[in-house]
């Protein structure tokens, strides 16, 4: 059974940091690209960061460049999102996604809430 379980969300003050984790099971994690998405209240879900199966390729969307870092540990079947210098506009539910190109299915986690507020 495929599972993606996010953790590490919570309430943090502006300027603070959080580290999200996404633990995967039930599929060949090291063959899948991994993504972090987020959905802010009243907004569409948006891509945050991407990492290829071997960590060779990494990309970030502009709002998080220089503040967020995606990484993965294929031995632990886990992908991480280190979030620094958090802003109120980073408040969202954060989801991880697994995808095996080309044309493979998407697997999604249930999400973890991140709230940035003073």
Image (tube, rainbow, N blue to C red):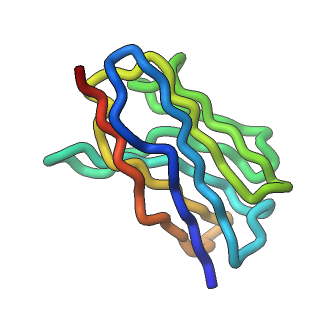
For image coordinates 49% across by 66% down, the residue present is 108
For image coordinates 72% across by 75% down, the residue present is 27
Residue 67 locus on image (x, y percent): 51, 20
Say which of 63 and 75 sits in front. Answer: 75
Seen as rendered, the residue at the extreme bottom is: 1
For image coordinates 62% across by 43% down, the residue present is 80
Residue 111 locus on image (x, y percent): 41, 57
For image coordinates 39% across by 22% down, the residue present is 86
Using the image, determine if residue 78 lies above or below residue 13: below
Question: How many labels were placed on the picture?
Answer: 0
Quarter occupied by the C terminus: top left
**Image position of 72 (left or right of 10):** right
Seen as rendered, the residue at the extreme left is: 42
Q: Quadrant of residue 3?
A: bottom right
Using the image, determine if residue 87 lies above or below residue 9: above
Seen as rendered, the residue at the extreme right is: 75
Quarter occupied by the N terminus: bottom right
Residue 114 locus on image (x, y percent): 36, 40
Using the image, determine if residue 31 lies above or below residue 62: below
Residue 6 locus on image (x, y percent): 52, 56
């Amino acid at each position: 059974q495929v599972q993606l379980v996010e953790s590490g969300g919570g309430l943090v003050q502006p300027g603070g940091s959080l580290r999200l984790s996404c633990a995967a099971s039930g599929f060949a994690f090291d063959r899948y690209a991994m993504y972090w998405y987020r959905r802010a209240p009243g907004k569409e879900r948006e891509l945050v960061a991407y990492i290829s199966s071997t960590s060779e390729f990494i990309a970030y969307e502009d709002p998080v460049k220089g503040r967020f870092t995606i990484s993965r540990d294929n031995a632990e079947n886990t992908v991480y999102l280190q979030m620094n210098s958090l802003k109120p506009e980073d408040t969202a539910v954060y989801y991880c996604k697994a995808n095996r190109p080309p044309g493979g299915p998407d697997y999604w986690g249930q999400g973890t809430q991140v709230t940035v507020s003073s």
